Amino acid sequence: MAKQKGYKKSSALGEFFRRATKSFSSKLGVFLLLFIVLACVIGPFLSPYGVNDVDLFNMYAGPSKEHLLGCDSMGRDMLTRLLYGGRYSLALGICASLFGAALGIIIGSIGGYFGGVTETVIMRFMDVWSALPGTMLCILVSNAMGSGFFATVIALTVGGIPGTVRMIRGQILSERSKEYIEAAQSINCSSPVIMFKHLLPNVIQPVIVTTTMGIGSTMIMAAGLSYIGLGIQPPNPEWGAMLTEGRTYIRTNPHLLLVPGIAIALTVFAINLMGDGVRDALDPKLRD
Amino acid sequence: MSRYILKRILGMIVILWCAGLVIFTLTYLVPGDPASLLLGKEASQETIEIKRHVMGLDKSFLGQLGSYMYNTFVRLDFGESWVFSSSVISELGVRLPRTLIVGLAAMVLNVVFGTLLGIFAGTHEGRWQDSLVMIIAMVFVSAPDFFVALLMILLFSLKLNWLPAYGIDSWKCYVMPILASSFGGIAINARQARSSMLEVIRADFVTTARSKGQKEGIIVRKHMLPNAMMPIITGVGGGLAGVIAGSPVIETVFSIPGVGAYLLSGVNQHDYPVVRACVIFFALFASIAVLIMDLCYAFLDPRIKAQYSKGKKVK
């Protein structure tokens, strides 16, 4: 390939990253999130304490040089538990959002692309599905499936699917009569190839934005589930479960409550800042 | 217009009917036999069998589903709680006002403060007022509502001793639940209102109004707001459903015996008539919220109105 002078080399992905991190707040979000993720992945290995090391001399200890964030009701080091539990919380949020987006995209693509009876059936089904508020569905499914990690991911996923399906289908409606689809059909591309190779890249942008934003609200919902006694439960060091454990000591040792709560809020804050950046980057109106 | 409303209400009934089907199936699929869980480990096999028969659990899935749907939607009978043997509907009647007070008050705060803050931020775009409002909104979007609620208890009940931390004995008890469940919604509405204000703030008709010397306040009220209203209404409708659906968590934090707490006690004790009735109530509430929202659209958006008045003329 001959090099063109005077043009800056830029790939679509590089361009996306450049635009997504243009503003100060989205840069802050990305760095904060990277920091939290790295801390949660590496932190527990560096800590001198184990996650479940009981130290009865340090029950309810406040922050000190040995225990930076103090200790809980069994003298377990809070920082270690926080970082270890962050893996659960982040994994829950990310897995549930991605899984929900994937299911929504598949169902929505099928409905939007095939049209006709398939579309009507799927969309009416989605109407019923979304008549039950997301939180209710989440509670019911979590109750039906138990409190494992995977069960909680499913419970957190179900509420958001109708929204994604509607969004994808709505986008496909405006794309499916375009020439490139007809061209693909005329060279005998199979339906899955058209749906996921040709159509998807043109309709996926709003889903990327809502999925990024959704990770934060999914983490909040996961914590809420733990709080009302469903989802992941103490003594697992998931943030919501730690918060649930800490509320018993709200009068005497509020740091047991504050530490996991602030961790959730800070992480969701970082994700939302990043989500705003992603939204601005994909907004055609803001393109230069 | 009445044809549109009628069509929407019919649709709502069908949706609720299907929602009942889904709820029944979901609770049916929960592992464990409610009768033996209810009677405890000591109960003999025969007692369990009799209990199963009384509860109607010995019938097939379709038989149970049929009698449930018939009782709920034809006779409007929600049955009796398995655990307390009391009528579910009368219990709901006692608990409903408590949940609605919190939900509706939080929703009014959402609309008023959310929209006002959003307009304020939008009209001061790029200045410090805008940044301040948006940073605060972002913080409240990110903090879980029950964590905010716990922090409020920590501050106002335990440190300052101003408000009771739980119960429903006086109006004071409702202050914190209402505030705690409205902050998130206010923040979301403010963000939504701001971005829809920014959509119209550079529109040509605003420039025209400015160039003819119109006062800034009138431009905002008469020209910008009506055009920015649609996405705001969507946010409000979603917020209403969200506040009511979030009630299990908030009611747990403040120990309010409302519908949300009733649902959770039903879930924890395998008391499925209670669970089903509560979820039907939440679904009903959510669909009423969507209906009101759509009617507002139809009322405010001349295009939808025209569509239906044209339809009348053709007939």
Image: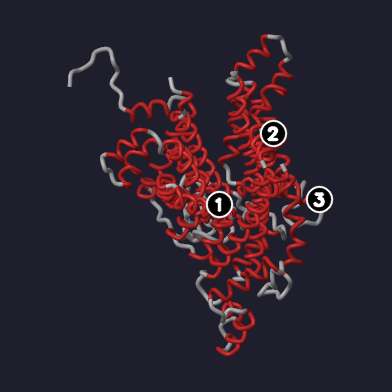
Q: Position of residue B131 (x, y in %)?
A: 59, 25
Q: CA distance from mark 1 to mark 3?
A: 38 Å
* Residue visible at 32% across and 42% down in the picture: A194
The chain holding disc 3 is B
- Report the amino acid beneath label 2: Leu
Instruction: Look at mark 1 in the image and give the residue it sits on.
Output: A127
Q: Position of residue A281 (x, y in %)?
A: 44, 28
| Location of residue B301 (image quadrant) | top right
A234 relative to A105, above or below: below
Label 2 SS: helix
Total numbered badges shown on the rendered structure: 3
Q: Nearer the viewer, residue B255 or B87?
A: B87
Which mark identifies residue B171? 3
Quadrant (top left/top right/bottom left/bottom right) for the N terminus of chain A: top left
Other-residue count near label 1 (Cα within 10 Å), few / some / many at <14 / 14–19 / ≥20: some
Q: Position of residue A264 (x, y in %)?
A: 52, 45
Q: Is residue B152 visible?
A: yes
A168 relative to B74, above or below: above
Is residue A131 toward the left or the right of residue A94 in the image? right
Other-residue count near label 2 (Cα within 10 Å), few / some / many at <14 / 14–19 / ≥20: some
The chain holding disc 1 is A
Q: Position of residue B253 (x, y in %)?
A: 66, 55
Label 3 SS: loop
- Report the amino acid beneath label 1: Asp
The chain holding disc 2 is B
Instruction: Look at mark 2 in the image and give the residue it sits on.
Output: B300
